């Protein structure tokens, strides 16, 4: 049964986040509950699935179904859930270490599989929970960790370019310093039918305090999203990684195929028989 109109705070669980004061993940939590309220989604129709890390604590703070899972495996669980329960709004979320390192294989295959889920990658370019090791998005010369005193010396991933190359049909970037835009992007991601990848620049104030400088370089893209993969490839390979907004959206049929198509093909009908 549909719930009466809910306010953003109605989607909060009441548990107090244990993130450091100033952590960017607060903005993602606030943006998400705003988006859920704006779309009027019932709380028992929302499922959040995370991996491990500071950002992966987020499902505990939302009054919905939640699964705080295994490191890097949130996307696998989320896709299975979405296929089994297409009536749910399934949101996978986690950090850059969780999603692009141990979970990197799941990430690229989720992009190409195009199951109808939203994936929020809260990227602070560091492993925050385990005290500041370099992650796949850490700049080559970041020398603030004793483990990499001269910087990791390895080229970082470009998450948007990686998602595009793997087949993601919807790619946006948000910033924890722009909560209103973040809420709008989250609502748009949830409305999109298929795999929606929202890359969020979400500062780690404790291990990367220099990320407060992001506000000087982040920009809001005013153009319409690029609608063709070849043009998006040029954009993502050339950009500085700080342009925010819906960057790329190209219509693509989600997997699995809709029930009528499955029923029309006897092999698919057999595969999807209850
Ligand atoms: Fe946020 Fe960094 Fe603190 Fe983790 S260590 S809660 S990412 S500020
Ligand atoms: Mg991180």
Image: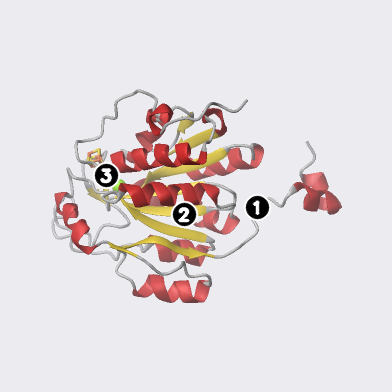
Residue 135 image offset from top left, x and y in percent = 29, 52
- Quick check: can you spot residue 102? no
Mark carried by residue 66: none
- Of the two numbered discs 3 and 1 on the same chain, state the one appearing first in sequence: 3
Label 3 Cα crowd, 10 Å radius (few <14 / some 14-19 / many 20+): many
Q: Position of residue 192 (x, y in %)?
A: 55, 52
- The secondary element bearing badge 2 is classed as strand
Residue labelled with disc 2: 197
**Between marks 3 and 1, how big is the CA–CA gap?**
32 Å
- Left or right: residue 273 compared with residue 48: right
> CA–CA distance between discs 3 and 2?
18 Å
Q: Residue at x 47, y 47 (%)?
A: 187
Mark 1, secondary structure of its residue? loop
The disc, 3 or 2, on the residue closer to the chain's N-terminal end is: 3
Is label 3 within 8 A of ligand 1 (CB to nearest ligand atom)? yes
| Mark 2 → mark 1, Cα distance in angstroms | 16 Å
The one of 23 and 106 positioned closer to us in this rendering: 23
**View extreme (top): residue:** 14
Mark 2 surroundings within 10 Å by alpha-carbon count, few (fewer than 14), some (14 through 19), many (20 or more): many
Q: Percent position (x, y) of residue 259?
A: 76, 47
Mark 3 lies on residue: 24
Query: 12 or 223, which is in the foreground?
Result: 223
Residue in view at x 34 percent, y 48 percent? 180
Is the Cβ of the residue at disc 2 closer than 8 Å to that at disc 1?
A: no
According to the image, label 1 marks what residue?
255
- CB atoms at circles 3 and 2 under 8 Å apart? no
- Quadrant showing the N terminus: top right
Task: Single out the residue that lies furthest toward the front.
Answer: 5
| Residue sitting at x 56%, y 65% | 250
> Is the residue 11 above or below the residue 251 in the image?
above
The first of marks 2 and 1 along the sequence is 2
């Amino acid at each position: 049964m549909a719930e009466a109109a809910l306010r953003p705070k109605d989607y909060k669980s009441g548990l107090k986040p244990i993130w450091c004061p100033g952590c960017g993940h607060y903005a993602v939590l606030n943006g998400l509950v705003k988006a859920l309220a704006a779309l009027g989604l019932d709380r028992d129709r929302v499922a959040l699935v995370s991996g491990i890390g500071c950002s992966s604590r987020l499902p505990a703070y939302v009054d919905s179904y939640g699964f705080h899972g295994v490191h890097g495996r949130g996307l696998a669980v989320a896709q299975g859930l979405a296929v089994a329960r297409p009536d749910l709004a399934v949101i996978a979320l986690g950090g850059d270490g969780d999603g692009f390192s141990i979970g990197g294989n799941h990430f690229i295959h989720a992009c190409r599989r195009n199951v109808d889920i939203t994936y929020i990658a809260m990227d602070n370019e560091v492993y925050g929970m385990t005290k500041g090791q370099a992650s796949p998005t850490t700049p080559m010369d970041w020398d603030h960790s004793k483990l990499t005193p001269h910087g990791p010396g390895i080229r970082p991933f470009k998450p948007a370019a990686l998602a595009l190359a793997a087949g993601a049909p919807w790619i946006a970037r948000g910033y924890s310093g722009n909560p209103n835009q973040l809420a709008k992007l989250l609502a748009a991601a949830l409305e999109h039918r298929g795999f929606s990848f929202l890359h969020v620049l979400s500062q780690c104030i404790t291990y990367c305090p220099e990320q407060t400088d992001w506000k000087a370089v982040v920009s809001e893209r005013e153009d319409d999203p690029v609608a063709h993969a070849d043009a998006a490839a040029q954009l993502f390979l050339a950009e500085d990684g700080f342009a925010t907004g819906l960057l790329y959206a190209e219509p693509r049929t989600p997997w699995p195929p809709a029930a009528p198509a499955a029923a029309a093909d006897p092999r698919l009908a057999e595969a999807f028989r209850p």
